[in-house]
Each structure stands twice: as structure tokens, then as C-alpha cells.
Image (spheres, grey):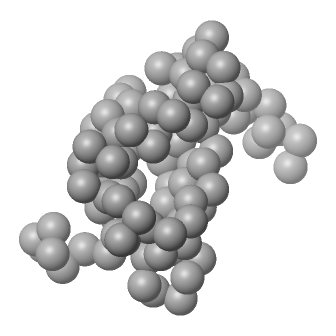
Amino acid sequence: MSQADKSVADQVKEVCETSFAPTEFVQCIDQSDGCGAKLLLTIVSDKFDKVPLIKRHRQVQKTLDEAGFGMDQIHAITIQAWTVEQYKKKQAKS
């Protein structure tokens, strides 16, 4: 499957898996009924260890921007950027 055949959500997931490797978990959900304009992105990586939340979000936004995902493709994105420890605590609560 070529990049052109993949959804925006799938492409974003691939970029994040590569950029924040090693990752424990990466999920990108299209919440816009298929157009890819509104995404929920979860990245679990120890690359976020000791990095403040705002800097994590900026890292993710910069990575996506450098990969060519600008406002013309993604209008809204919710970013959940967690360390492995934070993710495991959230999983234990649910």
C-alpha cells in the first residue's frame, strides 16, 4: 500500500512510531468521519521521560509539521504523549 492509499491517521501513526521509537504504544484515531481533519493521537514512549507536557506536544507538532502534515490536512489534533510508566498507571486505573 502506497502512502497515497493510506489514511491521514495511518500516515501520522507511522511517522510517530518512527520519530519517537522505541514506542510502547501508538494510536491515531480519525474522529472526523474519514477526512482526517480531526485526530486523537496517543504516543507512549520513554523519549518523553522528564520532558514537560507542553514540550512533548511541541515535539509532536514539530515532527508532524516536518513530515508535511500542516493545517491543510489536520485541522484539530488531541495529543496524549505519555511515558511508559504514565501509560501503565492509566491502564491500571481503567
x 36%, y 71%: residue: 72
Q: Residue furthest top?
A: 50
| Quarter holding residue 19 | top left
- Residue 11: quarter of image: bottom left
Question: Which quarter shows the N terminus?
Answer: bottom left
Quick check: 4 left or right of 93?
Answer: left
Percent of width and height locating residue 66:
26, 43
Q: Residue furthest left?
A: 2
Work out whether residue 34 or residue 58 is closer to the camera in this orientation and state it: 58
Task: Decide if residue 25 is in sight here.
Answer: no
Q: Is residue 32 above or below residue 42?
A: below
The correct choice, above or below, for 31 with respect to 27 in the image is below
Which residue reaches farthest front? 71
Q: Residue furthest right?
A: 93
Q: Is residue 47 left or right of residue 21?
A: right
Residue 94 in percent (x, y) is at: 86, 49
Q: Residue at x 15, y 75 (%)?
A: 4
Question: x%, y% of residue 80?
Answer: 64, 45
Q: Residue at x 72, y 28 (%)?
A: 86
Tell me where residue 10 sits by quadrant.
Answer: bottom left
Residue at 49% x, 60% y: name it: 28
66 to the left or right of 75: left
Q: Is residue 48 visible?
A: yes
- Residue 53 rendering spot, x and y as whole percentages: 67, 28
Give the number of marks: 0
